[in-house]
Image (cartoon, rainbow, N blue to C red):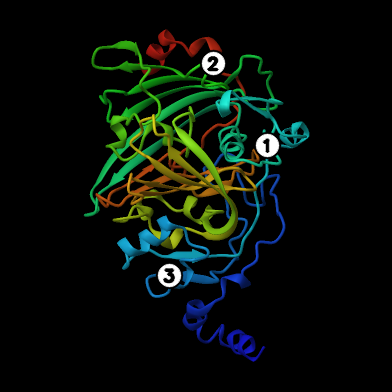
Amino acid sequence: MLKKIILLLSFSALPSILFADLDVNSLEIGGKEPINEPISGYENELNSYPDPFSEDQIILTIDNNNYSNYIDNVLTPGQTEMFNTYPDSFKINVYPSRRSCSVPQEVINLTRENAKLTDNGEGIEGVVGSIPFPQPTEALHYVWNHILRYRGVDISGSSPFFIVNPDGSRTYGAGEAIAKNYWNPFIRNDKGLQGMLMSKVTHPPRLADASLLVIESLNALKTPRRAWVYNPGTRRVRRAPDIAYDYKPSSSQGLTTTDQFDGFNGAKDRYNWTLIGIQKKLMPYNAYKFHETKTEEILTPYHVNQDYLRYELVNVAVVRADLKDNKRHILPHRTMYFDIDSHNMLVEETFDDEKKIIAYREFPIINFYDQPMCLSIHSATYDFATRRYQLTNVRSLDIPKIQWRLKKPLNERDFTPEGLKRYAR
């Protein structure tokens, strides 16, 4: 008891000592605090999402001086490798845990019981627009919850992407996309589809796979993904059955695969999936401060500017994917961390055949409370071999908002090879 009193009295005078010795078991996760509507100060016409927790203070900073104290409990292997690789710059600022995530009430109204997995987990049958597995019990339940989490209906928007080299130099690109999401409570879905997406690279303009159409079903075994690409050089559309699994788009410069888009997507048949369990880990969460910072300030060498990222102790489902003996994928081992509240993948780590870590990936989330829904504000992939990182799907104060529910629905008949050609131009 005396030791605890001394630590408490030392908090304001000697924060560095407290931060070095803080028992993570004293951190609490607490109850849900869902934000179901826009907060005071939010203006729909602006790109801003004001921080509901701007008054929160950092309660712990983990850096090269003390990270070894947390390796065996709240840090992931990927975070530990970030400290090992970038000891002079990487840090984790820990804030109070705020379980702010929510979904439209219509999603909750449809959610009663678990959906049904079919065809060894490649398909799903359930109430469209619901949370498919409100009581998940196995690895693929968490994967499907992530894939089918609420993400709007008729969607349109654009975002930049960056490859940042160790010397700070960058490759810049930008793209646009439109999509119809069928797993939502607002439109009838009797098509057996997850959704349809058309995207195009707007900068640089002559990438080989500059424009893409994807139609994704709810059963990858019975109805595999259909994809087409438009090449601006030839002005032709061609079928692209290879845009799946470990295909690497040219815009990623070899850092990410197709099935890593949005954390994980597509067929699951190349891996054995294992639920490791529910764990408390420090995750990038409620990243409003980062969202409200101009992009130029966050693009630092080696990794994004950690001063602007917020980490919280979060209950996550840890899922491991190990390549089957008779299958091929350039990522033989993957560990994924799914938020119990929002169903988002928050972190992924990839490993080679020898179980040596390849890359660490983060997906910081906020509650887009005008919807409401929790989604990531970017995807960051840190490659340890090259010390480059990729930042994609960037959503920020200085980037126009994604429109998640267009007033005028997108025309399904535009999502065709001929429609792709028109969209690309």
Of all residues, the one furthest to the front in this rendering is 325
Q: Quadrant of residue 25?
A: bottom right
| Residue type indicated by callout 3 | Tyr
Q: Residue at x 34, y 29 (%)?
A: 247
Residue corresponding to mark 2: 222
- In the image, residue 59 above or below residue 104: below
Residue corresponding to mark 3: 67
Question: Could you tell me residue 284's position as x and y percent?
Answer: 51, 54
Asked whether, in this view, residue 118 is left or right of residue 135, the answer is left
Question: Could you tell me residue 360's position as x and y percent?
Answer: 39, 50
Question: Could you tell me residue 244's position as x and y percent?
Answer: 40, 26
Asked whether, in this view, residue 396 is left or right of residue 109, the answer is left
| Residue type indicated by callout 1 | Phe
Give the distance between the C-alpha atoms of the residues marked 1 and 3, in whole angstroms: 35 Å
Numbered label attached to residue 133: 1
Depth order, front residue of 176/42: 176
Depth order, front residue of 185/201: 185
- Specify which label sits upstream in the sequence, 1 or 2: 1
Depth order, front residue of 303/356: 356
Give the distance between the C-alpha atoms of the residues marked 1 and 2, in whole angstroms: 22 Å
